[in-house]
Amino acid sequence: MRDVALGVVWGKSKPTSDSQGSMHLLLGHLLDTAAVGELVWERYLSASSRRILDGCSDGRGRSLFVLLCGLHDVGKATPAFQMKDDGLAARVRAAGLDWRNLSLRQGRGWHHSAAGAFIVRRCLQGSGWNAEGCGWVWPLIAGHHGVIPPIGRTVPKRNGEAQGRSQVWVDAQDAFVSQIATDLGVDLASLADVRVPSRAGQLAISGLIIMADWVASDQTRFGGQADLADVSLARSRERAVRAWADLGLRGGWRAGRAAPVGVADLVRHRFGKPARDAQVGVVRAVEEMSGPGLLIVEAPMGEGKTEAALVAAEVLARRFGADGVFVGMPTQATADPMFTRVGAWSVQVDPEAPLGLLHGRARFNKEWMTLRQQTVFGGICDGDEFGMEDVYGAVGGGGDVDRPAAGGVAAAEWFFGRKRGLLAPVAVGTIDHVLHAATRTKHVMLRQAGLVGRVVVLDEVHAYDVYMAQFLFEALRWLADAGVAVIVLSATLPPQLRRNLIRAYTQGALQRRDVAPLLEAGGEPAGYPSVTSTCVVDELPVTRVRSYPSWRKPLPVGVEILDEDEAFTPTAVAATVTAEMIDGGCALVVCNTVARAQAVYEALRPAFTDDVVLLHARFTAATRAAWTERVVDPLGPPGRSAAARRPERLVVVATQVAEQSFDVDVDLLVTDLAPIDLLLQRIGRLHRHHRPARDRPPRFQQPRVIVAGVRFDPDRPPTWPPGSRAVYGDHLLLRSAALVADAAAGTGWSVPEQVPALVAAGYSAEPLGPDRWAPTAARYQQEADEAEKRRETNAKAFLLSGEDELGKPTLDGLHDRSTAALESEERVAAVVRDGEESVEVILVRRSPSGGYLTLTGRHLGQTGEAAVSDEQLLEDVAGATIRLPASKDITIAARQDLAPLPGWDGDPWLKRTRALVLDTALSAQLGGYRLVYDHQVGLKHERTAAR
């Protein structure tokens, strides 16, 4: 019966798309997956990833991993699965593997992943494995479809017939386990002494098993084998090697390439400029760390944090066995320029290491697509940001980088299929990828597998609110447990956030909740820039903090307060800017909301005509990219070749897009009041670069910031527009107002020298402002505390595990309270980002003669079909991507009423992208609002229906 079972039990049915294909015996698929697992181990895994399994098995990690890959689908050797195909089921039953009184409903109720966990647990116990060993292995089998249940759901209490209650079925199942072990040369009893690896390590192994299974499930490369005589490990290895080469899969940096020993100045070696003091300190810190840990780099804008972080990632990779890096940025707009920088650097480390850009607009990043077209896989897999199936998920936009590729190799197309993006060895993407790896969602183990073995770099962490921070802390706990080094960068990091980051990483490394008694007191930076490192040595956290002089001289910034009217109309801002710019110069006006920015721009337009530019997130992607280029090029660093000439007069009106990765140098800053760290980020654009005095008008020789969006009255606390309150809350605005008032009454601020002290004051509990503000301040504080608790509670519902499960030994029941399936990028963002959801759409126009036009007026045909076959037209269509206002009514209506144009079904990206059809006035009705697009001011919306 043993050989009979091996020769009839099937694992894959005949593919419906291939009339010449055949079914695939289960043994063949198990051996295929084991053979792919061998290649994953040998050609993909980093040294640090291999150590997870080697460490728990005394160097037998390869055998253990390949065995687990080979056993993943053994649960298909059950009636519940074999009954799924009538013809194949008849063949199985005729061979003596029968079942009785088993309905289709009962069969569907017993999944083969749960059945496999039961079989593996039984067989390992029979081979002498103890409860601990069986306890961490069975969840890997149970979870190979992306969800790990509690053990109770893997016991066939009422599913005996579905599992196969007769001895003939038990013998058949044992035969598959025995045959796989025998073919692989593994003695199950010899592995009975394996120890339990870290929980994060288990999750990564789970993801790697899925990776092997997915590769081996490619029926175009692993054709069916219906005859047992055709099945052997040797043939599976041949198939696996061909598939691996065909898919172009490989791991990250080759050994010895990262941070070559003997290079005295790694910054100079990679970037051509001598390392600054802070950069030297960063490299020193990672060279001194006793193990993988957390590195926090706090330095002003323009100090070289990114370059320091990248060379530090090299050192950490060399020392602790990583082979790549993931760089997480706050937004897609900041990820694109970072991809350029990371790509140019990684090419120097190892020109063959695959590169990946992970966000929904990657298809329209010209540099990325140039790399993709240079690979043998010229096609692009148009998954959304997270590679998931997507019902009209708005995932596109126009790329805003048109520099030629700096060399390098794009990661194989396979890495950009569903949920696989983080498996690319060297990648840049939005922070959402790391945050989503900390959520209790299906296939989260694939994301963990991608992060393990890399160095993780997170930039602009001050940009994450209380809600997002909960996912960041959870991610740090899991990364620390897996031994992943993390580098965090910030120019304005609140002290409490720094302490919370250290606490979370230490919790993960020690797997205990209460680590406060172990954390060293007084570990606060004494200066700025500063470098803080934390790692665990002998079960104790070791934290080192050092400060370094900035390469820039302190910049004295004058602080003034604009006299706003009660209604905060744009008139006062426009009048002030007009008066200040009488002799020319370059000014930046930052507003807290799109509506206020649009109003200020329109108030300035009559006086400045073409010398005023508006920038915000409610332009189409193409227009925003064009306006950004018009601003960044002439206002960028001096001395660049082919750079545009600095204008004699220019006013840039912007929203928060000017806070991050916005390298402009202006003579004057006018900004709405914001929390102090964000206010300082905006000030970072003021006199940003050293340039000749003649480049600035005489009145702007000394940097000044004029703070608007706040009104100070002698008989009451300050006030601000409702839009500012909605974005930031009253508590932080009041504390920032107190600091601004003190600076305006005194000598201003010294930047960057005073940045840490100002940020600390803005986020501390110490009273600020006059005594008469105290009652209002106390109320604002209470409201902020209550809101923070609500956000923390809301986030906990989605966390992968949370603090309460620290120290749990296995993955048993990880998905017991699984979150709902997230079918689009915007729904994923809604989980890890707080606030109202919003939807991206493509703006098209209805043609008076019938059919559709692009926003720029080009014909799309009667159903929009022309965009599918014309790349230039497709780029024009994609350039009209825009994010709708974050209004609940608009979002609901967009999801319900908007769909792709009928003719877009032929393009894998367009067919999932909603279109908003505008009339001849470029307007549309949606969710009780009238939306109007204006090429100069962007998208406006006003309510037309009663609530």
Image (cartoon, rainbow, N blue to C red):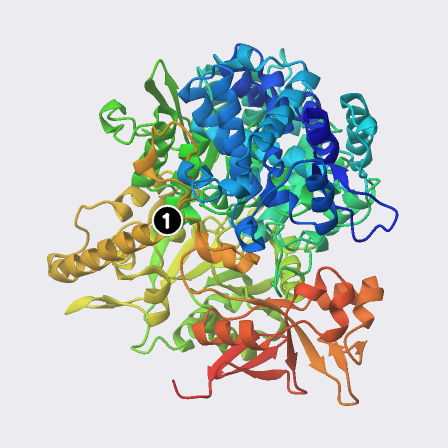
Would you call the spot at circle 1 few (<14 residues within 10 Å), some (14-19), or many (20 or more)? many
Q: Position of residue 568 (x, y in %)?
A: 35, 75
Dot 1: element: helix
Indicate the quadrant where residue 549 lies. top left
Indicate the quadrant where residue 5 lies. top right
The residue sitting at 29% across, 40% down in the picture is 496
Q: Give, as a three-letter code, the residue at label 1.
A: Asp
Q: Position of residue 733 (x, y in %)?
A: 29, 59
Q: Which residue is mark 1?
A: 677
- Is 873 drawn above or below residue 447 in the view shown? below
Could you say which is closer to the camera, residue 121 or residue 452?
121
The residue sitting at 76% across, 50% down in the picture is 380
Indicate the quadrant where residue 849 lies. bottom right
- Is 732 drawn above or below residue 125 in the view shown? below
Examine the rendering and report whether any part of residue 862 can be seen: yes
Q: Quadrant of the C terminus?
A: bottom left
Could you say which is closer to the camera, residue 622 or residue 736?
622
Q: Position of residue 525 (x, y in %)?
A: 33, 29
